[in-house]
Amino acid sequence: MADSLKWRKEPGPRVEGSRDLDSSKVQAPGIVALPGGGYRLYYTAVGPGKPFPTCQGYVLSAVSDDGVSFQVEPGVRVAPDPSIEHGSLRYLAPTVTQLADGRWRMYFESRGPATLPTVIASAISSDMFEWELEEGIRLQGFNGIGGPRYVELPDGRGRLYCFATEPTAKGVISAVTMDGLNFELEPGYRVKNGRSAIEARGITAADVLPPSAAGQPWRMLYSAWQDAPPGAVIPPHPSSDPDAVESGLSEDFAAASIASDLAGFRSRIFAARSADGLLWEREGCVIEGDGLGAPGIDAVHAEDMSFIQLDDGSYRVYYAACDKDGNWRIASAVTC
């Protein structure tokens, strides 16, 4: 297609495990351009410094002047709370928007025990560094909703794009809000899995950018997984094991989840475009996992992305990349 974007991977990681809070696994970035210039990258991580033994992940942050070289910030931005049933184990895929009063709201996927479906929860901040959890659930339904990305609409409403899971389907859905707290699901799927073998296992996240000028399309990037080959032995993943806490699997979340990740699955990033943000036309795979391009490292995973438009009109995407040794990092690519 004439206006389809071509992506070029940038060398090296933007963020990788470097301390007790994130040394085991780094995933699910959410990029925000700062009002005074520069960028803050929120991401999900886990490591031996986690706030409690069964915690499976929390939101950290890093800052950058140029969007390429990032410095991690101390402490945890948002952490699960064992007293909140739907958010007792893991928070991931943060997306942030500024409110009319100058404060900021973060939406994220919230996970409790595997017996409960994933939901979208939120937190509020006046400085983008210290965050306070907001009570309740922002969005729930299907057999689980996650991977949120927030978009401001021209009419003053907001829209969340998320993945939704059903017994026979997994795809991107959307919901709209007037106040940022109460959302109404929009009918149907924006993009649905099953169109090709390399998307067959399901879509795990999507990010959307409205057009920056009249006549330009809406842009979507989404990640989807390919099934493991027949006969592959799949170790139990802690997030889908109802006994993960009792069995101790949750305490060793990173190792157990990475073993499942590397059991023959593959994830990739795909593109789609739309004239209205509701009906989408697929444009195919745009980013393969490649271990950041290091020689001799097999392609495995590229997923959970967040992208922005730069001042020159090009785009940069931040995404989670995994090599054959199970090392997860945040990588990036730009349009060319």
Image: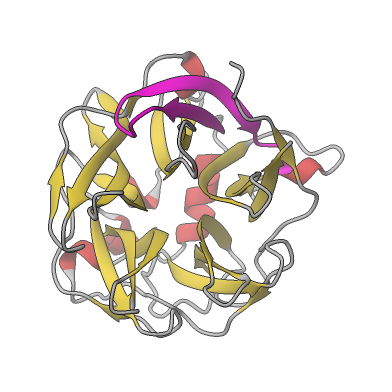
* Quarter of the picture holding the C terminus: top right
Q: Is residue 42 above or below residue 203?
A: below
Q: Which residues are magenta?
A: 268-291
Q: Does any portion of residue 231 appear in the rendered image? A: no
Q: Is residue 26 left or right of residue 165?
A: right
Name the residue located 78 percent from the left edge and 39 percent from the top edge.
297
Vertical comparison of 236 with 93: above or below: above
Is residue 58 visible to the viewer in this orientation of the structure?
Answer: yes
Residue at 41% across, 14% down: 195
What secondary structure is the stretch in magenta mostly built from? strand
Residue 207 quadrant: top left
Above or below residue 254? Residue 230 is above
Task: Determine if the magenta segment contains residue 282.
Answer: yes
Which corner quadrant holds the N terminus? Answer: top right
Seen at 76% across and 47% down, the residue is: 10
Residue 264 appears left or right of 117:
right
Picture coordinates of residue 273, whole percent (x, y) = 45, 28
Q: Nearer the viewer, residue 20 or 10?
A: 10
